[in-house]
Amino acid sequence: MTSILVLNGPNLNMLGSREPEIYGTDSLTAIERICRERGDHLGVDIEFLHSNHEGTLIDAIHNASTRTDAIVINAAAYTHTSVALMDALKSVPQPVVEIHLTNIHRRESFRSRSYISLAADGVILGFGAKGYALAIEAALGLAKPR
Ligand code: CA2
């Protein structure tokens, strides 16, 4: 069965509780449900992970190289800072789909720079929680059988 790793970075566990006008009202648990429902619909196994720690996200990317066919990642604020996450994504053969809830190009200028985009095959942004379902479909389209 095709397996897609969905990785979530810092503070995304706070979704739904603060700043709903920016990030919407869906919690990360609701987003996980959206991903699992789309996975069931498409016949894809979803591994859903959140961490506030850069190293944990990097470990998950390295571990994915043997278990996963594609990676969907919302690196949150690490998007704009982490050369280490970019390098980790470049170090594995799996296709990468970058996802953001918001359109990062319509926000503060520092959010327009994405290190993740330099390692991503495609980017989905600005569609809120529903963007995760789009990202999973895109990742399945790119996935290569192991
Ligand atoms: O739009 C996105 O998905 C982001 O990756 C979300 C990040 C932000 O730093 C990126 O620039 C764009 C923020 C993650 C969630 O942060 C929260 C902050 C306050 C309350 C709830 C969540």
Image (cartoon, rainbow, N blue to C red):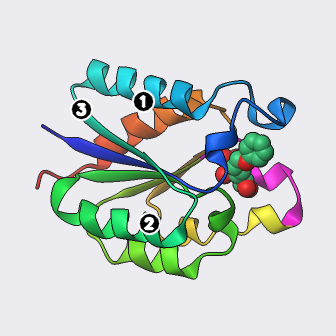
- The residue shown at (30%, 40%) is 140
Residue 126 visible? yes
- The residue shown at (23%, 53%) is 68
In the image, residue 108 lies at what x, y percent? Answer: 88, 59
Q: In this rendering, is residue 67 above or below 42?
A: below
Q: Which residue is mark 1?
A: 35
Q: Is residue 14 magenta?
A: no
Quadrant occupied by the N terminus: top left
In the image, residue 52 lies at what x, y percent? Answer: 58, 59
Which mark sits nearer the N-terminus, 2 or 1? 1
- Please name the amino acid that badge 3 sits on: Val
Alpha carbons under labels 2 and 3: distance apart:
24 Å
- Please name the amino acid that badge 1 sits on: Cys
Q: Which residues are magenta?
A: 100-109
- The residue shown at (69%, 41%) is 14
Residue 141 visible? no
Quadrant occupied by the C terminus: bottom left
Q: Which residue is mark 3?
A: 44
In the image, residue 142 lies at what x, y percent? Answer: 30, 49
Alpha carbons under labels 2 and 1: distance apart:
21 Å
From the viewer's perspective, is the residue at label 2 or at label 1 nearer? 2
From the viewer's perspective, is the residue at label 2 or at label 3 nearer? 2
Q: Which residue is mark 2?
A: 56
- Please name the amino acid that badge 2 sits on: Thr
On the picture, is 130 further left or further right than 39?
right
